[in-house]
């Protein structure tokens, strides 16, 4: 029996990256969370101080958001940030990303299929998101001087119950292939910075300096 989900082509979207102030707010709420009352309302405890944590980040690659999706019928699709597109280019080639996917179709199907098997979950679709960057994608940035390259940074799966789960930590293991011009963003460089959540504004200075380190 085919599930209702499998009759739909529902796009797996990459959510916006939250701003630092929202990350701080969410962290503090989670840190103070102390269960729920009898009505299911959250209970928050008072705290005198918050911890200092080390956060990791990568340089911003200036290109365009692109992703490759393997659906439940083992078909490959490409996506821009807001649209799912067929690989024949009939609805746009997304800076010739369709040519890249077609050229690497076997590798991408094989890799995404391996991950599906490893996860052993009721997966309907699996998508790898990245930055598609290089010559002809954006002007006036250093990365525009290189041949087009896919820089993966996120891996998401959509389950049969329509929920989406993240497995970003699997990207470095499966998606580095320089011959195919597939380079995970954390292969470029990873920065580790301490954030004191009692005074997070101090970290903004370091973040702003790193923000200038773009490709």
Image (tube, helix red, strand yellow):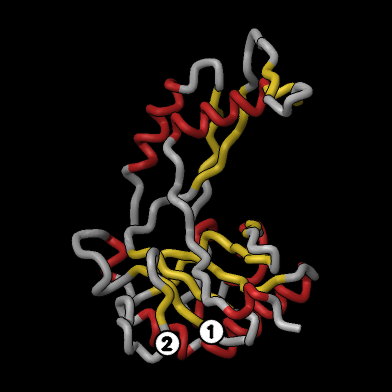
Q: Looking at this view, is 132 or 29 the one in front?
A: 29
Instruction: Determine which residue is flagged by label 2.
Output: 87
Residue 111 horizontal/vertical position (percent): 64, 79
Give left or right: position of 186 versus 166: left
Q: Name the residue under label 1.
A: 76
What residue is drawn where x is 61% and y is 25%? 29
Identify the secondary structure beneath mark 2: loop
Q: How many marks?
A: 2
Separation (CA) of disc 2 from disc 1: 8 Å
Find numbered disc 1 in the image and state the secondary structure of the residue it sits on.
strand
Image quadrant occupied by the N terminus? bottom right
Question: Crowdedness of circle 2 by 10 Å Cα count: few (<14), some, many (20+)?
Answer: many
Residue 147, by quadrant, is bottom left
Q: State yes or no: discs 2 and 1 in contact (Cβ < 8 Å).
A: yes
Residue depicted at 48% across the width and 50% down the height: 58
Question: What residue appears at the point 72 percent right and 78 percent down from the top-left corner?
Answer: 114
Left or right: 141 as drawn, with respect to 80: left
* Residue, far left: 140
Q: What is the quadrant of the C terminus in the image?
A: bottom left
- Horizontal and vertical percent position of residue 166: 63, 57
Q: In this view, does 127 lie above or below 13?
A: below
Direction front: furthest residue = 39
Q: Left or right: 214 with respect to 45?
A: left
């Amino acid at each position: 029996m085919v599930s209702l989900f499998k009759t739909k082509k529902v796009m797996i979207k990459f959510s916006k990256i939250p701003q630092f102030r929202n990350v701080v707010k969410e962290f503090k709420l989670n840190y103070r969370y102390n269960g729920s009352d009898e009505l299911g309302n959250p209970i928050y405890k008072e705290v005198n101080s918050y911890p200092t944590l080390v956060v990791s980040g990568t340089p911003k690659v200036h290109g365009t958001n692109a992703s490759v999706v393997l659906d439940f019928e083992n078909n490959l699709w490409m996506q821009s940030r807001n649209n799912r597109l067929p690989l024949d280019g009939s609805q746009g080639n997304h800076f010739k990303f369709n040519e890249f996917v077609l050229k690497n179709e076997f590798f991408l199907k094989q890799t995404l299929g391996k991950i599906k098997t490893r996860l052993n979950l009721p997966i309907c679709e699996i998508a790898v998101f990245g930055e598609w960057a290089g010559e002809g994608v954006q002007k006036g940035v250093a990365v525009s001087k290189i041949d087009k390259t896919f820089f993966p940074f996120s891996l998401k799966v959509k389950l049969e119950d329509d929920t989406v789960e993240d497995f970003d930590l699997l990207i470095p293991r499966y998606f580095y292939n320089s011959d195919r011009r597939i380079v995970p963003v954390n292969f470029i460089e990873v920065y580790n910075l301490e954030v004191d959540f009692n005074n997070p504004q101090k970290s903004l200075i370091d973040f702003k300096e790193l923000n200038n380190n773009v490709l």
